[in-house]
Amino acid sequence: MYNWIDALADLQNQGEPCVLVTIIEELGSTPRNAGSKMVVSARQAFDTIGGGHLEYKAMQIARDMLASGRQDTHLERFSLGASLGQCCGGATVLLFEPMGQVQAQVAVFGAGHVGRALVPLLAGLPCRVRWIDSREEEFPGQIPHGVRKIVAEEPVDEIDDLPAGSYCIVMTHNHQLDLELTAAILRRNDFAYFGLIGSRTKRTKFEHRLRDRGFDAGVVQRMRCPMGIGEVKGKLPAEIAISIAGEIIATYNANFGQHTAGAEPIAKLLPVSRRSQAAHLKASN
């Protein structure tokens, strides 16, 4: 049998969420061993906590947690008797621990200096990252684990394939491409977060052009530009990347599971001062 340790390692390497289930306590005369563990993913279960109806119920609870995105570790007490098909009395306490729950599907458009600083930060978070650029030579030789490199002649075409509720970050080398990406992202309007690198002046220009294309002002308002946490100052790529990553974390912590156009990103409440982005744009790509 595939043991829970190997299964957990493999699932985490694959970026697949799972729940670790552990018998914490046995009360009364029961045949189960405290400390037994099993790992439950959306499709499979590995190892065993003793089988039977209790194990079946534990799998149901674990998969409900995965489906709902529940992140808290919790205990559940099961009375053993007729309700669990047991012939003996007693009780079992199980610990449910979510592991590797993906909280954000992130699409980063642009492999310039800021993109190369940002993507490794995102790779260390509970995120799945698509890193998209038309210039293969701009990508580093080593792509971080959990990041999918996409070399696309037409990056705008990749937007159709993004999951609903994605976190979209646009920071390409070309303002016209930034505008086309922005229009495509806003046209879908089902993102959890959309950030565009640049200054307030860039935002104003884009707002005018988007208005000319018929975009509603309320939809355009969801665009975060300048993006990043304003209190994190600096012109270095790493400094800008940290401010953007911090905003991503704040947003998914506030809104995990709200994958609709009506979800109100916490970024809207954060300061927007990011003049250093504008100052850095020429040097970053």
Image: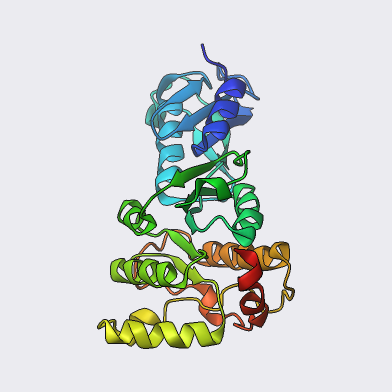
Residue 165 in the image: x percent, y percent?
Answer: 39, 60
Q: Is residue 125 above or below residue 88?
A: below
Display colour scheme: rainbow
Query: If the image is split into quadrants, where does the C terminus sit?
Result: bottom right
Residue 91 in the image: x percent, y percent?
Answer: 55, 31
Visible in this render: residue 159? yes
Observer-nearest residue: 131 or 129?
131
Q: Residue furthest top?
A: 1
Residue 48 in the image: x percent, y percent?
Answer: 51, 20
Residue 187 lies in quadrant:
bottom left
Q: Is residue 264 left or right of residue 266?
A: left
Q: Residue at x 42, y 20 (%)?
A: 52
Visible in this render: residue 246? no
Q: Is residue 107 above or below residue 80?
A: below
Observer-nearest residue: 139 or 64?
139
Q: Is residue 108 above or below residue 141?
A: below
Residue 156 lies in quadrant:
bottom left
Observer-nearest residue: 137 or 165?
137
Q: Residue at x 50, y 71 (%)?
A: 196
Q: Is residue 219 left or right of residue 229?
A: left
Q: Residue at x 30, y 55 (%)?
A: 160
Q: Residue at x 46, y 67 (%)?
A: 193
Observer-nearest residue: 6 or 15?
15
